[in-house]
Image: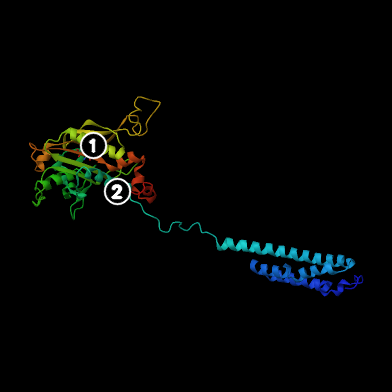
Amino acid sequence: MSAPNSEYDPVEVSSLHPDEVARMVSDALSAFEAARDLDELKQARLAHTGDRAPLTLANREIGALPPQARKDAGRRVGAARREVGEALARRQAVLEAERDERVLVDEAVDVTLPWDRAPRGARHPLTTIQERVADVFVAMGWEVAEGPEVEAEWLNFDALNIGPDHPARTMQDTFFVAAEGADGADGADDSGLVLRTHTSPVQARTMLARTRQTADGSGEPGRGMPIYVICPGRTFRTDELDATHTPVFSQVEGLAVDEGLTMAHLKGTLDHFASSMFGAGITTRLRPSYFPFTEPSAEMDLQCFVCRGASVGDPERPCRTCGSEGWIEWGGCGMVNPRVLVACGVDPERYTGFAFGMGLERTLMFRHGIEDMHDMVEGDVRFATAFGMEV
Ligand code: DAH
């Protein structure tokens, strides 16, 4: 190799010629400009700034130049690379901004669309509690009885010793069913049917069926006494819907007819029923009352399952659930009135019976702290889902 070529002119290294460098720069800039997205820009970047890019190769040539030429070429190539680098960064920023904007549009979520396309339903807690009540009694050997919601006036009232003058029969409480073609202007058009005002007619129906005293004489062959039946069902009264009333509500009726039944059996049954609804150890209290179809009759109170009586006389610890009474009224009960037994063909000398009936909405309201009847009847599935699912 000869001595260093001090006369070496960088212009003679063609890749370092100013025109050539300018061309490389302009090639790179137009390639960046032509890139329509970040992928294309990446290709352009590799082609114009990568290891094998003309400017990179040119840069490498600089080392071979004589010192005086190196500086000039270095400055020129350095400026060119800087310009290319800046153009690349600018184009990169533009394309990234475009991409971000496109993503915002393409991946936008329409928050007004339903988020749950196949929403799950829920069983109404009233249905669940009716089944639960039935289960509690079936586990004790009782049967589940049913009766029609459109009931004979005679079964709803007369058979239960509710005479024609009883206040429960006035138009205020009862939905009377008009006879076909009637104009409903006066009571003479009555069909003899009502929407049952309570589940108690199922008592009469059950006894009549067991004693073969049904109108068509069919009865239930071979099935007589004893009777242990429970009947949860829908009932109707002409009440306005408000926080504590609804014209369509539910009751559960219980009836036992056997030899030797006493109030003690009634009390024991109710205590068990109350514990299974409200928790172990809850007690019931019987308070003298009057129902035409039971004698003696009682109101059945529950010991308050929130304060368990501790709030009574203690102003420091008021209880909202029982109003600091210590007890909550739950339903009516008593020993089946012998007049009812007779009306239904049961020998009152041989058999005694006990019966009870309570509102299921009320039971649910206590049990779950539901404060407004509207929630129970409006049918919003969000109310029902909160109770979970019991199958
Ligand atoms: N049927 C009554 C009512 O709707 C409740 C009731 C009271 C049912 C006493 C009974 C009973 O079986 O013995 O208010």
Q: Which type of secondary structure does the marked residue at label 2 adopt?
A: helix
Where is mark 1, residue-wise?
A: 270
Q: Is mark 2 within 8 Å of ligand 1?
A: no
Residue 154 in percent (x, y) is at 14, 45
The structure residue drawn at horizontal position 35% and vertical position 45%, both measured from the top left corner, is 374
The numbered mark, 1 or 2, whose residue comes first in the sequence reads 2
Residue 125 placed where, x, y %? 32, 47
Q: Is mark 1 within 8 Å of ligand 1?
A: no
Judging depth in this view, the residue of 217 and 197 nearest the camera is 217
Residue at 9% across, 40% down: 342
Please indicate, yes or no, whether residue 132 appears anywhere in the rendered image.
yes
Residue indicated by mark 2: 127
Q: Quadrant of ligand 1?
A: top left
The residue type indicated by label 1 comes to Leu
Give the left or right position of residue 83, taking residue 150 as reference: right
- Locate the N terminus and report the quarter of the image it occupies: bottom right
How many numbered discs?
Answer: 2
34 relative position to 337: left or right: right
Q: What is the three-letter code of the residue carrying label 2?
A: Thr
Nearer mark to the viewer, of 1 and 2? 1
User: Is residue 197 something one can see in this rendering?
Assistant: no
Pick out the residue farthest to the front: 1
> How far apart are the two marked residues, 1 and 2, measured between alpha carbons?
21 Å
Q: Nearer the viewer, residue 166 or 281?
A: 281
Q: Residues within 10 Å of mark 2 (few under 14, many from 20)?
A: some
In this view, 161 is above or below 97: above
**Residue 89 image offset from top left, x and y in percent:** 71, 62
SS at mark 1?
helix
Is 265 above or below relative to 195? above
Residue 302 image-quadrant placement: top left
